[in-house]
Amino acid sequence: MSSLFFPKRAAKKAIAERIAARVRERDSWPTWRYNKPREFFKFISEWQRSKRNLPSKEELDAEFPVKPVDWELLSSNHRGKSTCAVTWLGHATCLVQMDGFSILTDPVFSNRCAPTQLAGPARY
């Protein structure tokens, strides 16, 4: 009866059902399941407990010291003739310098690595 009065709505519903069936058919993550709120809060509490095992700032500085930037070296790489220099800046960010051009790859210029600044992992 509703398809008689609302044919566009029925057509949209049929298309949505066909798309959903295709997605279920091609499911690349067969172990996925929707969790109950209780399981979500359990995950959050376990995550909070695991944060206690993180090394202190002093331990991190001893194991992974942060080196000061040698600006003179970087600018001399930029003035090179036909040389190529790649400077790893951290995680996935590199500065590629060749033939007088500088290219910065994968920069994150915000406080959080997320589409929104309200959520997502904070940079250190």
Image (cartoon, rainbow, N blue to C red):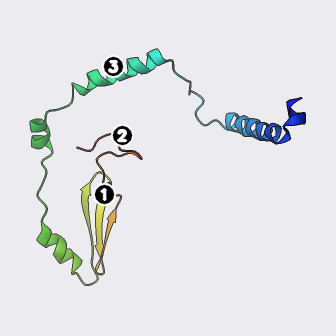
**How far, Cα to Cα, is label 2 from label 1?**
23 Å
- Label 2 crowding class (10 Å Cα cut-off): few <14, some 14-19, many 20+? few
Furthest residue to the bottom?
Answer: 81
Return the x and y of residue 68 as percentages of the image width and height.
11, 58
Return the x and y of residue 119 as percentages of the image width and height.
37, 38
Q: Secondary structure at mark 1?
A: strand
From what the image shows, is residue 8 above or below residue 94? above
Look at label 3 and name its amino acid. Ser
Look at label 1 and name its amino acid. Thr
**Quadrant in the rendering for residue 124:** top left
Return the x and y of residue 84 as percentages of the image width and height.
29, 74
Marks 3,2: beta carbons within 8 A: no
Quadrant the N terminus occupies: top right
Which residue matches tag 3?
45
Point 45% across, 15% down: residue: 38
- Label 1 crowding class (10 Å Cα cut-off): few <14, some 14-19, many 20+? some
Q: Secondary structure at mark 3?
A: helix
Look at label 2 and name its amino acid. Leu
Q: Is residue 44 left or right of residue 67?
A: right
